[in-house]
Amino acid sequence: MGNEQLHQRCVSHLRMLCEEIRDRSVGSEGNRRATKFFEQELRSLGWQTEASKLNVVDWEDRGATLRIGFQSFSVRPSPYSLGCAYVAELASASSIDELEQQELTGKIVLLHGDIAKEQLMPKNFVFYNPDEHRRIIALLEQKQPAAIVSATGRNAALVGGVYPFPLIEDGDFDIPSVYTTDEEGVRLLAFVGQRAELRTTSTSLTAGRSSRSQKP
């Protein structure tokens, strides 16, 4: 196979895996489709393949809404997040120090700025998990906010350049969360201290996990 043919084949594979199959999250239909595609390509080259099945969390994104008074904000459920229906005070934190200093129990916390600069590794991911990420997750679980809104920016080196990117993507993290753009985050900061209504109907398809609700 010549260099041009090899180049075209690589482009074709990338188009399939990045454009045609947009969601390859573990346990999703896209993940199974990508795995099947990869297996077929290997077999076409004469390779023998084996597959091992394992139980994983699947998840359905059914949308989310965030309102404060008459204002609406564009948010998306974080992958694998529990659904929720909360009306609670909006708080914010832009650094680990701010997160440590605040009382967040039962509040909806907006994470923005430096603390939301890169996607956090899942809490039980053993292969790579920076101390800073573990500290943020531990603080969030200790502070027990009702839900999390993360405002993330543009960074071509992160999550394939997705904008906004989900700060949290973790099937073992039980605090409901959504994410939005840094621009929406700036709008939200003006409403810190006010009551916010957050509703998500995403579903995590695994035993023992369910959506949560809290009335005003």
Image (tube, rainbow, N blue to C red):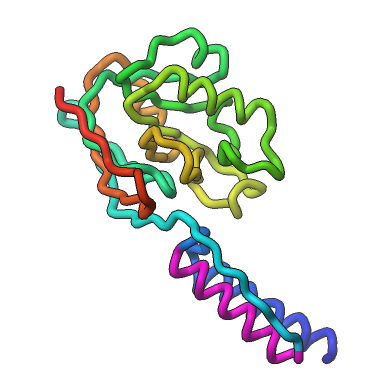
Q: Is residue 19 above or below residue 60?
A: below
Left or right of 74 in this view: 216:
left
Estimate the x, y position of residue 93 in percent, counting from the top left: 47, 19
Q: Position of residue 64 (x, y in %)?
A: 28, 45
The x, y position of residue 84, in whole percent, is 26, 38
The answer to whether residue 103 is visible is yes
Q: Give the quarter of the image for residue 57.
A: bottom left
Viewer-nearest residue: 183 or 1? 1
Up/down of 12 relative to 99, above or below: below
Image quarter hosting the N terminus: bottom right
Name the side, left or right, on which 175 lies relative to 64: right
At horizontal 52% and vertical 70% (from top left) the residue drawn is: 19
Q: Is residue 67 visible?
A: no
In magenta, the rendered stretch is: 28-46
- Name the residue rendered at 46%, 45% in the picture: 171
Q: Looking at the image, how many numbered discs can be counted on the residues?
A: 0
Using the image, determine if residue 89 lies above or below residue 173. above
| Residue 107 in picture, x, y percent from top left | 31, 20
Main secondary structure type of the part rendered in magenta: helix
* Residue 7, magenta (yes or no): no
* Quadrant of image for the C terminus: top left
Q: Residue at x 39, y 33 (%)?
A: 175
